[in-house]
Image (cartoon, helix red, strand yellow):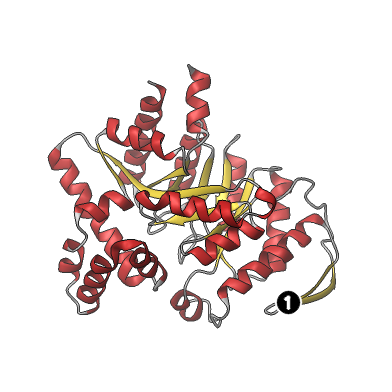
């Protein structure tokens, strides 16, 4: 039975809300996920913890779980520096780091990193091509539309195995790019009923029909009563409205494209007019069911098993303080036990 548990759990990942997370809380979560047998822990990067230094620490603190950047943007670091970082982590613990890469959004890139947000799709493509050259130890002579490099190569031990690279993708163009130049895609706030669409785009655009992995991130909560469920739903509705209205246009645009334009426009309008509470209330139960895993333990386990046929579920939990961290670890333990039954 233990083999069965690990085969299921290894097909799942863990991530966390970056807001308020600390090195200590992430380490506690990573160790628990490692011991329970989860396949990946993904490290988000926005304007909190920095990923490469955190990943180096966690690789030493854990035994077998793979760590992924979920996701690094292609503006705040050079492609060469990201490649150097991946090669360095591979020397610390070979073949345990996966690179999640994406463009992020205009507000973060320009107002936090002071870089110009231009040609995000092309830049992501060229970053992936350059990073692969760097980590393999090739001489990097590259003349692209956003990157021009020449005359250097990595002056340390390169990676022997292929670096896993996944594109943070929402729209079909980014999913297509992931299929063409990466090992798969990462989707966040992606309606569960539309995962088949994302998977089909990956398959149809894949070069030489190579299989691609689709990681799907969903906030997780196991609830044991109606009262508890209502409290959690209220918290998650705040999360959804924040991302739709405040984290650039990409989440809102993709949800509108996938059939939720009416809800998205209402949430954005209320939020931008200062009616934050009404914007939260505008996240109806239907949309919440599509974007989060909130329910009884048996229901969540059933949803997890059904989604394993289409995508690799990644469970997002809160670790903003000691209480949240302990509660999230207990939730993962309960989930592991459920998948064992």
Q: Describe residue 152's horizontal placement relative to residue 83 as left or right.
A: right
Closest to the observer, 110 or 210: 210
Q: Describe residue 193's horizontal placement relative to residue 225 as left or right.
A: right
Q: Where does the image place residue 141, in percent across and percent down from the top left?
A: 83, 72
Q: Describe residue 38's horizontal placement relative to residue 85 as left or right.
A: left
Residue drawn at x 32%, y 62% as measured from the top left? 259
Taking 317 as reference, is 269 above or below it?
below
For the C terminus, the image quarter is top left
The image quarter in which residue 86 lies: bottom right
Residue drawn at x 19%, y 77% as measured from the top left? 274
Taking 194 as reference, is 267 above or below it?
below
Q: Residue furthest top?
A: 1
Q: Residue furthest front?
A: 204
Q: Where does the image place residue 275, in percent across and percent down from the top left?
A: 17, 74
Question: Which secondary structure, mark 1?
Answer: loop
How many labels, in total? 1
Taking 226 as reference, is 189 above or below it?
below
The image quarter in which residue 75 lies: bottom right
Residue drawn at x 28%, y 34% as measured from the top left? 299
Closest to the observer, 87 or 176: 176
What residue sits right under mark 1 in the picture? Answer: 144
Closest to the observer, 321 or 317: 317
Q: From where the camera sits, is residue 272 visible? A: yes
Q: Where does the image place residue 150, in percent across and percent down from the top left?
A: 83, 75
Q: From where the camera sits, is residue 54 visible? A: no
Q: Describe residue 136's horizontal placement relative to residue 258 as left or right.
A: right
Label 1 crowd (10 A; few <14 / some 14-19 / many >=20): some
Q: Where does the image place residue 287, in percent across and percent down from the top left?
A: 26, 55
């Amino acid at each position: 039975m233990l083999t069965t548990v690990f085969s299921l759990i290894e097909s799942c990942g863990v991530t966390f809300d970056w807001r308020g997370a600390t090195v200590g809380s992430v380490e506690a979560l990573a160790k628990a996920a490692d011991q329970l047998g989860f396949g990946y822990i993904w490290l988000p990067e926005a304007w909190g913890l920095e990923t490469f230094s955190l990943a180096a620490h966690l690789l030493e603190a854990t035994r077998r779980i793979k760590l992924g950047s979920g996701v690094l943007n292609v503006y705040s670091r050079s492609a060469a520096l990201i490649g150097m970082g991946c090669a360095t982590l591979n020397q610390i613990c070979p073949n345990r780091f996966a690179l999640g890469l994406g463009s992020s959004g205009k507000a973060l890139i320009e107002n936090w990193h002071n870089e110009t947000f231009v040609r995000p799709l092309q830049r992501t493509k060229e970053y992936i091509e350059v990073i692969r050259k760097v980590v393999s130890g090739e001489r990097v002579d590259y003349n692209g539309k956003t990157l021009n490099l020449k005359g250097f190569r990595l002056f340390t031990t390169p990676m022997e195995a292929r670096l896993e690279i996944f594109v943070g993708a929402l729209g079909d163009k980014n999913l297509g790019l992931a299929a063409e130049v990466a090992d798969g895609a990462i989707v966040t706030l992606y309606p569960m009923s539309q995962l088949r669409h994302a998977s089909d785009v990956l398959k149809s655009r894949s070069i030489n029909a190579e299989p691609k992995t689709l990681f799907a991130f969903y906030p997780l909560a196991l609830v044991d009563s109606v009262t508890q469920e209502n409290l959690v739903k209220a918290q998650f509705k705040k999360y959804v409205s924040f991302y739709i209205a405040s984290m650039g246009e990409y989440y809102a645009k993709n949800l509108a494209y996938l059939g939720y334009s009416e809800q998205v426009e209402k949430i954005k309008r209320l939020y931008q007019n200062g009616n934050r509470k009404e914007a939260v209330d505008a996240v109806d139960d239907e949309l919440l069911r599509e974007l989060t895993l909130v329910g009884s333990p048996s229901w969540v386990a059933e949803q997890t098993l059904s989604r394993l046929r289409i995508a690799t579920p990644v469970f997002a939990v809160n670790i903003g303080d000691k209480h949240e961290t302990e509660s999230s670890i207990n939730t993962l333990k309960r989930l592991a036990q459920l998948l064992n039954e």
